[in-house]
Every structure is written in structure tokens, then in C-alpha cells.
Image (cartoon, rainbow, N blue to C red):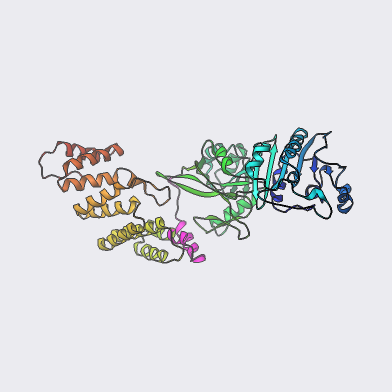
Amino acid sequence: MPFSSNSGKKYIKNIVSRVPHEKMLDVGCGSGTYAKMFPDAEWTGIEVWEPYDEEYKLSDLYGYLYIEDARTWEPVAKYDVAFAGDVLEHMTEEEAAKVFCKLKECADTVVVSIPIGPYPQDEYEGNPYEAHITDNWSEADVIRVFGQPTWSHIDNEIGVFIWSIYPIKPRICVYAISKNEAHFIPRFCESAEDADMILIADTGSDDGLPEEAYKYGATVHHISISPWRFDLARNAALALVPGDMDICISLDIDEVLQPGWRKAIEAVWKIGVTTRLRYMFDWGCGIQFYYEKIHAKHGYMWHHPCHEYPIPDGRITEVWAKTDFLVAVHMPDPTKSRSQYLDLLELSVNEDPACPRNAFYYARELSFHSQWWQSIEACKRYLQLPRATWQNERCYAYRVMGRCYNELGNFAEAERAFQMAASEAPNTREPWCELAMLMYRQARWPECFAYASRTLQIVDRALVYTCDPEVWGYQPHDLAAISAWNLGLKDIALREGKIAADLNPHDERLKSNVRFYSEAKTSDTEPVI
């Protein structure tokens, strides 16, 4: 057909725009699709079927038009880009390989668009050249015959393959919002120096932050958000990112990209295809989990006044990539106030009452402010939400409830809450260790030992934000040791006590307990608890 499928065209336009493309060659012009796509280029066309010249006004589209068979044509000029769009399937594999070699000899970048899979086609309106000769190309066949492409993508029935002497890399912008964090700027900017752009939207610093950022080549814009909310600030920052950026990395100024971050992202992000990246993030305090704040420039917005999160526009289809590489580390200022979070989370819940994510964050934040009963009620509300289905987070909500009941002195309700937490996520350590600690507070040694032992049976640590690093440290071993001693299991007490002390070597209490377990033969005294 003289008209080619729309599949693959947006990818071709995206990638070709990244390489020099002033002088271009189109082999198999058809209706002139590529000349129309890049009308400002200097075009040469090769078309085997002469009637198409008059029918599609090819001489008006191409500065140089040759009515010739690509299989016998020999190039006499050099080009920036050569296109073989829906043409190589019209010849044998051997003929296609020879035509491709000629294109690589005369062009710095070669674009092949070809049907993938069975795609038979007969002659069209008397044109015998429209018949498909090799009508079952696969991606593997393309690579075998033409070599490994610089970039490729299968879009519906069409495969787009591009070979270029130029590296085809994404354009990356690291963007952040800021206020009075000038002391973090050197560390932040140095970690992001491999980005194509560092953009900071400052919300009113008076500590010299913009001036400090300019020293490191960052672009700084001044924005005003009143009343304050994080999502609008990040949306303002995102709107300031130039439209030609492919990847936007959202960071806080107290977060630091890790060496090798760009290479890790480029390894999994397919330009023009991928829209979102899931990557490893270190929150600090021994908590690492997969994060999702690296996204395409277009089609995303931030949602929620606090604990904001990028969400896709309903008109795009998200295409995820994933890397296990630790991309960023949170290195916060412990003196920084978070007093505004509670009010903003309450606003978030009122604005989007069906969202489980911030419903839980609000419940947890209430517990941070010692509002025990309010936190319990908020946890109950979260647990009743239809979309609150993630077991680890539901477990966390019951743990928060249990801690609140414990603070209120209601051990029975605390125990019920922790039991519910264990039923939600039985293969995680956190609820079992909570139960062991609750039993310890009540000197219920058989149960304390049982729950501590159950905790230690779990050896697979989930990389999620609900993880409590304490349960992967000395704590469960310490609880097992103390309860074992009180049950007369002295060998176990010594073993677990040593492990606890090794895991936290600066804790004098743990060291004292080990000495006690080791030296005591028969004694009614108890270890230091």
C-alpha cells in the first residue's frame, strides 16, 4: 500500500528528532509519509512505481526524486537519515540485506519500519511492487539479518528499528521544590551533575539558596503557593521543566542520587515508550523500598496536599520499567519540623476520602501526635475502605492501632490488634515482634518466647516502606533471650543474647545481659531488662 500504518510513526518522529536530520533519503516513497513528517528537511526519494509521482505529487515533496528500484539503485550522496519504511518486506531476505547495507553506507542513521509477524499483501491497484515477498518477519529475524539496532520498538503490528552512529539517550531533568535548604545544595547538585538539567522551584528561601544553586549550574525559578500544599508546588515545578525532557526525576533537596544512577535508568528506560520507573530508594533509618517518583515529562501531575504522589493523566497509558539499582538516598535534617503534615493530611483525606494511601498516613500521623483515640478511629476508617487491599499496609494499620491501645494501657485490645496485624501479613516479622514485646511488658514469658521465635523464623525481608528495621536487628533476639531465661532455657538465652549484642555492639545493657547469661549457674536474679 502507498499508505503506511500509523503504528510506530510517533516513535520514529521522536527518535529522528534527536539526531541530525537536515538531509534525508526515503526509499519507497509511497504517498510521501516521511517527507510530510519532516517537511523542513532536504529530501531525496526513491520510488519504483512511477504513477505515484503524479498521484501523490511526490516531485513537490522531494527535492530529488528517482524512479528506480531500490534493489538496483546505487547511492551517490551522503545523508543524515535514510528511511526504509514498509519497503523491505516487498523483497527477499537476501535482497533486503543488500538494500540495508547500501543505506548504512550512505546514511548516519537508518530507520526501518516493517510488519512483524504474518502480514500477507497482494498487488495494489495494478502495482505489482506492493505485494509482500517476505511477509513473516520477526524481531529476531530483523536483528539476525541487519544487526543489533541502536533503538527499537514493536508498536502493534509494526516494528521500528533504528541504527545510528549517534548515541540515542534520554534527556533527563532532576527537579525539586525548596525553601531554606542552602546547606544541602552542594551535595544535591553534585549528585545530580550527570542530569541534562537541574531545576529548582524555590518557594521563598531567605538563606541564599538560589545563589548557591546557581553556582552549581542549576536553573532556579521562584514560585508562590498560598495556602501551602506540596502537590501544587510540585506541579508548578513540573510545569517549568522544558517540554523536550524525556525523564523527570523528582527529588527533595535532602535526597542524594547515587553514583551510576543515570546508567541504571538508561538501561531500562526505552525512549518514547516508558513513562514511569520503579526503583530502589533508601528512606534512611534502615528502610529501603521501591519508589515511583521518576516519570515522563508529559502526562503526569501531582496529587494530595501532603505525601503527594505523581498520578497519570487519564488519557495516557502507563508503561512501567523497573530497576533494582539504589537510585537515591534520603539524608534528612533531623531538626526540620513536620508540624504542618497533620493538617495537610486531614485536608487530603477530606478532598479524596476514598484514597487508602493518605487515609493511612493520616491515621499514622495522628499517633505521632499522641492522639491515640483519633488514630484508632482513623485506622478503622482506613481498613474499611474498598481500595485498602494491600496486606502489608493493612498490617501496619493494625500495628498502629495496637500501639495506640498499648499507650492507653488497654493490653487486651492491643493484643487483638496485633493478632489482626499478624493475620493480614503472617510472613512479615513486624506483627509477631509487636506481640512478643507486648507479652514482655506483661511478663507472659511462654508467649513472649513463642512470638519472638516466630519472628526469627521469618528470613525474607520485604523491600516495602512498612518494614520496621528494628525487627531485623537485635530486638527479637533480645526478647527471645530474656523470655528463654525466664523459662529456664539458659543455653538459648545465651545464644540469642550474644546475637543481640553482636547486632548492637554499643548497647551496654545487651553486653551486661550476655555476661549474666554466661556467668550465672544457678541464680534467681534476672537479666537487665
Q: Which residue is drawn at 38% across and 56% down?
A: 368
Question: In the image, 72: left or right of 281?
Answer: right
Q: What's drawn in magenta, residue-wise?
A: 334-360
Camera-nearest residue between 227 and 393:
393
Camera-nearest residue between 334 and 82:
82
| Residue 457 visible, this angle | yes
Q: Position of residue 488 (x, y in %)?
A: 14, 46
Q: Where is residue 443 in the image (x, y as percent from the top left)?
A: 19, 53
Relative to 518, say whether 451 is above or below: below
Q: Is residue 350 magenta?
A: yes
Count the numbered circles shown. Answer: 0
Q: Where is residue 208 in the image (x, y as percent from the top left)?
A: 57, 42
Question: In the image, 501: left or right of 171?
Answer: left
Q: Quadrant of residue 220?
A: top right
Q: Residue at x 81, y 49 (%)?
A: 128
Q: Does the magenta stretch include residue 106?
A: no
Q: Where is residue 341 in the image (x, y as percent from the top left)?
A: 46, 56
Relative to 376, say whether 453 is above or below: above
Q: Which residue is drawn at 39% across and 63% down?
A: 379
Question: In the image, 150: left or right of 509?
Answer: right
Camera-nearest residue between 154 and 496:
154
Question: In the image, 486: left or right of 34?
Answer: left
| Residue 203 visible, this angle | no
